[in-house]
Every structure is written in C-alpha cells, then in structure tokens.
C-alpha cells in the first residue's frame, strides 16, 4: 500500500468550507480503484488553520490513476481554493496499518 500526504494552510474563515468540501470528496474517492482510507488531521489548537491529509491506496498505480479522474481533480481544486498554501503532494510507502472493522 501507498499513501499520499499533503499539508494545507486553510484560509481564515474557510475551515468549515474546507471540511465540507473534503467530506464531499470522500464519496468520489470511494468509487476510485484501490482507494482504502482518507484521514484529514487538524492541529490540537482549534484555532489552527493547519491540516494534513493522508489517503491510502492499494498500489502506486491506483494512486496515480486517481490524479487522472476528472471529478476527483475538480473536487481537489475546490479544496485548494479554501487554502492559502499547500505542500506538494508526496507519496510514501505504508509500512504497517491497522484499522478496526466497524
């Protein structure tokens, strides 16, 4: 498995819009081949505008294919419109994972 990791700095007053946009993205991601899980993390300080997203995919090929999905790409552009800045998306190998079955 592989993960895509991205850091975001959300525009002031746009945190709720950022969250809503990311939530709308999850339905599209569920339909993408190889998609496993999406985690969006926010700092301990509730006033922080920093966030990090980690999406996990079965293979590198699946992750890269998601970049070519028009609807997914459109939603990502909406997420980025809520941000002042973001780090380049980078890929990392998942060494170990464990999620409970719910």
Image (tube, rainbow, N blue to C red):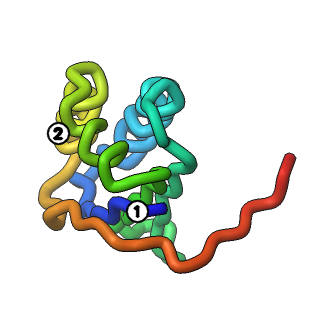
Residue at the spot x=49%, y=42% of the render? Answer: 35
Question: Of circles 1 and 2, which is in front?
Answer: 1
Q: Residue at x 37, y 36 (%)?
A: 17
Q: Is residue 83 visible?
A: yes
Q: Nearer the viewer, residue 46 or 63?
A: 63
Secondary structure at numbered mark 2: helix
Residue that badge 1 annotates: 3
State how far apart marks 1 and 2 are (Cα).
23 Å
76 left or right of 88 in image: right
Estimate how packed mark 2 is, as few (under 14), some (14 to 19) or many (20 or more) residues with alpha carbons within 10 Å: some
- Residue 48: x %, y % from top left: 38, 69
Tell me if mark 1 has few (under 14), some (14-19) or many (20+) residues whose alpha carbon lies within 10 angstroms of its own: many
- Residue 49 at least partly seen: no
Along the line of sight, the residue nearer the viewer: 31 or 43: 31
C-beta proximity under 8 Å, tags 1 and 2: no
Identify which residue, 100 or 23, lies in the foreground. Answer: 100
Q: Nearer the viewer, residue 64 or 14?
A: 64
Secondary structure at badge 1 equals strand
**Image coordinates for residue 77, horizontal then vertical, percent:** 18, 35
Q: Percent x, y for residue 73?
A: 22, 31
Residue at image mark 2: 81
- Residue 33: % across, % down: 45, 33
Residue 23 as seen in the image, left or right of residue 84: right
Residue at horizontal 72 percent and vertical 68 percent from the top: 98
Rendered view: 72 above or below 45: above
Q: In the rendered image, which quarter is residue 92 located in?
A: bottom left
User: What residue lies at 47% left-to-right and 56% top-to-bottom?
Assistant: 56
First of labels 1, 2 by sequence position: 1
Looking at the image, residue 92 sits to the left or right of residue 19; the answer is: left
């Amino acid at each position: 498995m592989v993960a895509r990791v991205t850091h975001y700095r959300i525009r002031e007053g746009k945190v709720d819009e950022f969250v809503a946009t990311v939530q709308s993205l999850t339905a599209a991601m569920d339909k993408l081949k190889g998609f496993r899980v999406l985690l969006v993390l926010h700092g301990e300080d509730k006033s922080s505008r920093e966030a990090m997203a980690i999406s996990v995919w079965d293979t590198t090929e699946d992750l890269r294919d998601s970049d070519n999905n028009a609807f997914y790409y459109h939603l990502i552009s909406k997420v980025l419109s809520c941000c002042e800045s973001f780090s380049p998306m980078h890929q990392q190998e998942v060494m170990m994972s464990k999620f409970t079955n719910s």
